[in-house]
């Protein structure tokens, strides 16, 4: 059974964890509402990760693994921002649980397997 999220007077279906059921429902306003629920401040660095997840999904039809995100951060910024510690500072409950949710992805398969 799905739940809903209301963004700009539009009802969007989400699962019981808060992940979008249809990634095409995503937009930046949806991201803001989800981030607020997750208590994540949408800094430029957080937006960079969110947009990376979206872009990777658009091209590959899958969510990038955490290590792929770290590789991209290293390419863009060097070692300073390419650490698990840095990513967990932005997303304290985890990249898959929060970054992917804010980016409008369905629940990552790994999270389903861990349930």
Image (spheres, rainbow, N blue to C red):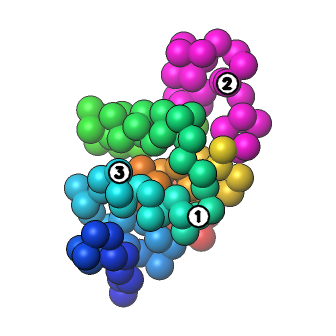
Mark 3 or 1: in front is 3
Compared with residue 37, is residue 53 higher up or lower down, i.e. above or below?
above
Residue farthest toward the front in the current orientation of the protein: 8
Residue 113 appears anywhere in the view: no
Kindly indicate the quadrant of the structure image that contains residue 7. Answer: bottom left
Q: Position of residue 3 (x, y in %)?
A: 38, 83
Categorize mark 2 by other alpha carbons within 10 Å: few (<14), some (14-19), many (20+): some
**Gap between marks 1 and 2 measured at Cα:** 22 Å
> Is there CB contact under 8 Å for labels 1 and 2?
no
The crowd level at tag 3 (other Cα within 10 Å; few <14, some 14-19, many 20+) is some
Q: Is residue 68 visible?
A: yes
Q: Residue placed farthest to the right in the image?
A: 85
Q: Which residue is mark 3?
A: 28
First in residue order: circle 3 vs circle 1? 3
Position above or below: 82 against 31: above
Q: Is residue 46 magenta?
A: no
Q: Which mark is residue 81?
A: 2
Mark 2 vs mark 3, CA separation in Å? 23 Å
Q: Residues within 10 Å of mark 1 (few under 14, many from 20)?
A: some
Q: CA distance from mark 3 to mark 1?
A: 15 Å
Give the mark nearest the N terminus, 2 or 3.
3
Q: Are marks 3 and 1 in contact (CB under 8 Å)?
A: no
Residue interval drawn in magenta: 67-89
Q: Which residue is mark 1?
A: 38
- Residue at (57%, 41%) from the top-left corner? 43
Give the structural element (helix, strand or loop) at label 3: helix
Helix, strand or loop at mark 1 = helix
């Amino acid at each position: 059974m799905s739940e809903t999220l209301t963004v700009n007077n539009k009802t969007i279906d989400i699962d019981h964890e808060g992940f979008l059921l249809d990634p095409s429902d995503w937009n930046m306003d949806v991201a803001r509402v989800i981030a607020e629920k997750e208590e994540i401040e949408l800094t430029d660095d957080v937006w960079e990760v969110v947009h990376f997840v979206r872009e990777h999904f658009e091209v590959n039809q899958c969510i990038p693994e955490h290590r792929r995100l770290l590789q991209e951060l290293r390419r863009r910024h060097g070692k300073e921002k390419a650490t698990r510690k840095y990513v967990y500072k932005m997303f304290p409950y985890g990249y898959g649980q929060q970054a992917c949710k804010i980016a409008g992805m369905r629940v990552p398969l790994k999270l389903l397997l861990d349930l």
